[in-house]
Image (tube, helix red, strand yellow):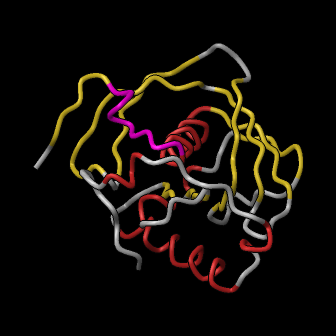
Amino acid sequence: MLPLVTLPAESLRQQSADIDRSVLASAEMQQFIDEMIPTMYGDDGIGLAAPQVGRNIRIFTIGKEAIKDFTVIQGTIDAAHDLVVVNPIWYKLSRKTTIDTEGCLSVPKTFGKVKRSRDIHVEALDRHGNTLSFDAHNYFARVVQHEVDHLNGILFIDRAKGVYTVD
């Protein structure tokens, strides 16, 4: 498992760099991806972005439990397996939003209500450098937006209302 980076680490506030396809294909990068997934599950996470484990690169994982309500435009998403997303960009598909409680592995024991777009379109690469294009809705869309925020140096507490901590 990879060590988690938590606040007040300044690296969590930095913009992450795109990953070149040749770097993505390297054995070192594929090993890193393989290590991200159990790290995500280690503290009951549903998503994990590379900055949360000390690498400011544009990659994140999403646990299979969150992969529902989607339409694949190009590429493959298998809802029975965890998803790896590289160099993502997302766009709103509608003006509809939802507000729900979020937490974060990098901001332990802290929660707050965050308003997010309900329906989004995502353009990215998969872990092998293949084009991935999909529409995500509801909870899946929320998790994607939360993880992309990490890649942009934004934490959920920057968007949240009613932030609280638990012991």
Q: Residue furthest bottom?
A: 27
User: On screen, 51 above or below 110?
Assistant: below
Classify the position of the N terminus by image quarter.
bottom left
Q: Overall secondary structure of the magenta stretch? A: loop
Q: Residue furthest left?
A: 167
Measured from the top left, where is residue 92 in percent x and y? 69, 24
Magenta-span inclusion, residue 159: yes
Q: Residue furthest top?
A: 95
Which residue: 32% across, 34% down? 157
Residue segment shown in magenta: 152-160
User: On screen, 33 above or below 107?
Assistant: below
From the viewer's perspective, is 15 left or right of 133? left
Measured from the top left, where is residue 87 in percent x and y? 69, 52
Which residue: 72% across, 81% down? 26
Instruction: Name the image quarter holding residue 148.
Output: top right
Measured from the top left, where is residue 62 in percent x and y? 57, 56
Instruction: Name the image quarter holding residue 3.
Output: bottom left
Measured from the top left, where is residue 101 in percent x and y? 36, 33
User: On screen, 92 above or below 58?
Assistant: above
Magenta-span inclusion, residue 32: no
From the viewer's perspective, is 27 left or right of 73? left
Number of numbered discs overlaid on the protein picture: 0
User: On screen, 89 above or below 162?
Assistant: below
From the viewer's perspective, is 122 left or right of 163? right
